[in-house]
Amino acid sequence: MLCKLKESSLAAIASYALFKTLARWRAASTLRQPMSTGRETKGRDYQAALSALGGLIGESKMDRDRSFGEMRTWIKVFEIEEKLPHLSIIHVAGTKGKGSTCAFTDSILRTHGRRVGFFSSPHLVDIRERFRLNGRPMPEEVFLKHFWWCWDKTQVGVQQGLERPGLFKFVTLLALRAFISEGVDVAVMEVGIGGRLDCTNVVPQPVACGVTALGYDHVNILGNTLTEIAREKAGIFKQGSPAFTVPQETEAMASLKQCAAKMGPGFELSTVAPWSTFQRADHTPVRLGIRGEHQLQNASLAVQLFRVWNAHYGPATPGDEDLLNQGVLPELYARGLEKTVWPGRTQVVPDEPGLQFFLDGAHTQESMAACARWFSEASGELPDVGAGKVVAGGTSRRRTERVLLFNMMDKRDPGTLLGSLHRSFAAEGVHIDRAIFVPGRSHTAGMHKINGTQTVQWQEELREYWDNLQSKAPGKVNPQHKRKLCHVTERTNAHLTGGTLCAVTCKEQGEAGPRSSEVHTSLESVLQTLRHRAAARPDLQLQVLVTGSLYLVGDMLQELKYQV
């Protein structure tokens, strides 16, 4: 994320995920308190670290240019100025797929026996997900060692006249310091937002830079056109660092090439080869660990990023370059791509019998279309079976029921995501039997944990928008009377009647039969309702798509007790 936290929208983006973790361990807030040296902190355990991090949310008020300039001073305070140029780094920016590309690259590196540090954002369940060592979130004791050392150095910087850093600036510095101290062979760094003034862009000389697919996101920060957005992403280009991108929209590609031309002689921006040009030596398919057709170009970019890195830091496996030049994917490359795990992105998590969750943190208009295509493919791998047919495990599942579980950040036009998703469902022939709208666990605007029942006004608006889309869809009848909104709270006793998912009996005005949309006040209520539905109807296979927000996906993973 960018160093600029002046805009309230960016502060919300940078800090929402952290509150999901802080909700469980909310010690006394350090907001607006003087920076602690650690002696004033009650203990130096994990809870204290989380509380201290909470005090950094929304701290920085300076403009972007000045804030990024201070990063160069902070690396001196953190004693990494001289060591940073010796840290081998792969740097990836983009609108869609940069996290997945980093995850693919990280997995290929580890398959080749490399010790890898992987910095990403946001986290879904635990802050330590942002600092991965060898494919796993940084161990708690290692995290605490580096956290408190950096915390004390931050106090030193404040005493020297530096502005107290915001959350993303601090965790970026922490990641760089930790990866250097832990002696990783390579650090894979995902840009937060943009690139040119992103905190991660303090890295002086990456081994390679990558730009994933570009689209419209964070337009209030990066610009309203693809030309402006591409210019910000291209800000990670460095003379002497090979740069690669995937195929882009014409406007975006033109802007990237203009930026590349300004880098001077010898700098070249290359477009990676299509995934279709690669195959295994034995012609067996490569089943990517992160599913979805849109992941193919991310995998192709990861192959090229590792290929360049390996050329610098080999020795390369004999014959690998010859194979790649022939369009043959070496086995270790293929194995790394197949073993890639990236929670919350095109992920399927089975729950109880008859209940599966399909999770994808898509949150742009373009990624909604990709999400619909993936869900159509992935859910179709468990096809409907005829009445009386027996499927795996001896359970009779006569038909599939598909549920959409959705939320998105407020103050955005629902059409950008929900409308795109609805159109994409129609194009893919996916029928959604029921849509459920639910707020996250924290308030995204005020950044305060809500005590008690949360407001669902925004979710009501999303439900109404969805119902309007449904009523206008081909084959749908526009109801003559507006149906009564059904609110389901966690205090409601589940009462399944009439084949509806709703946890209460809905009395609808002017329309009989089960509702096609609901608003719940909590994920606990949603999960309880879905599990009751699966248990009460063993003839059904419930397939629940959770999307619209990475934070909603993270909340659901936490609710499902999934270990990231």
Image: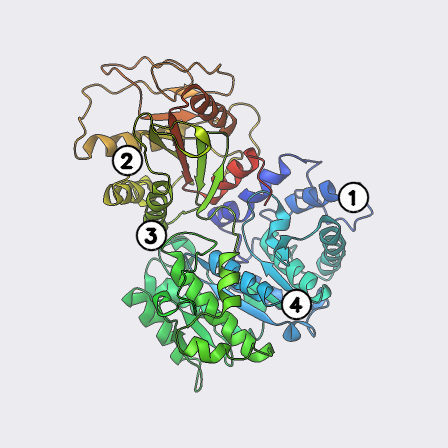
Residue 212 % position (x, y): 42, 63
Question: Which secondary structure, mark 3?
Answer: helix
Which residue type carries mark 1?
Thr
Residue 519 % position (x, y): 40, 26
User: Which label number is shown at residue 385?
Assistant: none
- Assess disc 3: are there few (<14), some (14-19) or many (≥20) residues with their C-alpha within 10 Å of its C-alpha: many
Residue 166 seen by the camera:
no
Question: Which secondary structure, mark 2?
Answer: loop
Of the residues under marks 1 and 4, which one precedes in the sequence? 1
Single out the mark in the foreground, 1 or 3.
3
Residue 96 % position (x, y): 41, 56
Specify whether 285 is left or right of 238.
left
Single out the mark in the foreground, 4 or 2.
2
Q: In which quarter of the view is residue 22 placed? A: top right
Residue beneath disc 3: 366
User: Which label number is shown at residue 73?
Assistant: 4
The C terminus, quarter of image: top right
Measure the C-alpha gap from mark 4 to mark 2.
54 Å
Specify whether 398 is left or right of 104.
left
Single out the mark in the foreground, 2 or 1.
2
Measure the C-alpha gap from mark 1 to mark 3.
45 Å
Of the residues under marks 3 and 4, which one precedes in the sequence? 4
- Assess disc 4: are there few (<14), some (14-19) or many (≥20) residues with their C-alpha within 10 Å of its C-alpha: few
* Residue at x-position 80% and y-position 40%: 42
- Note whether 555 is above or below 520 in the view shown: below
Residue beneath disc 2: 431
Q: 147 or 272: which is nearer to us?
A: 272
Question: Which secondary structure, mark 4?
Answer: helix
Residue beneath disc 1: 41
Instruction: Count up the numbered dots.
Output: 4
